[in-house]
Image: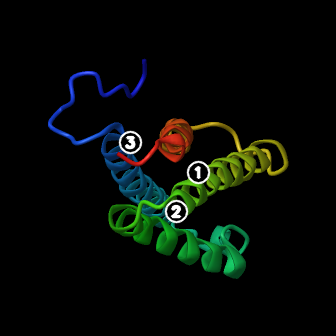
Amino acid sequence: MIFNNSDGGGMNSKEDFYRNILIIGWIQLLQIVVVMFIVSILIAGVDNDFSGFAKDPGMLGVDVMVVVFAIYAILPLVLKGFGSVYIRWANFGLTIFFFLFFLVHQLSHLFVDNIPLSWYHLLDFVHHIVILAMVWVSFLWARCNKT
């Protein structure tokens, strides 16, 4: 089974195992979105044209990015410090929300803005894969009984 803690790995429980995967996952997601933003800046710099930033992300998008960065940064600490059933289910809901949010965002660029696929989108796909795996692990963690 994917993400099965069959060998124990020195961890106390499946709950700890899932929690640790999620902590690492949120850190990975933060790294990916920051790198995506840096790559956008690099592309604009190489092209010597930053005018695209007025539309995407625009001021609203910048505000959204700040909130996403903050949530991605704080969640590993929240998950490490608190593991109540409410936190676990809230984490599950957030992973679903962010998966759908970023999926719709990327699809809108592909189909509405007619932005062709490029190597840059590899980071988007990695983000989707990581967060989709986290949805599954979040569900498993939320269903764990306290041990």
Q: Is residue 96 left or right of residue 68?
A: right
Q: Mark 3 to mark 1: distance in Å? A: 12 Å
Q: Specify the amino acid type for callout 3.
A: Tyr
Q: Earlier in the sequence, mark 3 or mark 2?
A: 3
Q: Mark 3 to mark 2: distance in Å? A: 13 Å
Secondary structure category for the residue under label 3: helix
Which residue corresponds to mark 3?
Answer: 18
Which residue corresponds to mark 2?
Answer: 87
Residue 42, horizontal then vertical, whole percent: 43, 62
Q: Is residue 52 left or right of residue 126?
A: right
Residue 17, horizontal then vertical, whole percent: 31, 41
Quarter of the image with the N terminus in it: top left
Q: Which mark is residue 92?
A: 1
When the figure is inspected, residue 35 is found, relative to residue 68, above or below; the finding is above
Q: Which mark is residue 17?
A: none
Residue occupying image coordinates x 59% and y 54%: 89
Q: Specify the amino acid type for callout 2.
A: Ile
Q: Are marks 1 and 2 in contact (CB under 8 Å)?
A: no
Q: Specify the amino acid type for callout 1.
A: Phe
Crowd rating for badge 1 (residues with CA inside 10 Å; few <14, some 14–19, many 20+): many
> Which of the pair 33/12 is nearer the observer?
12
Q: Earlier in the sequence, mark 3 or mark 1?
A: 3
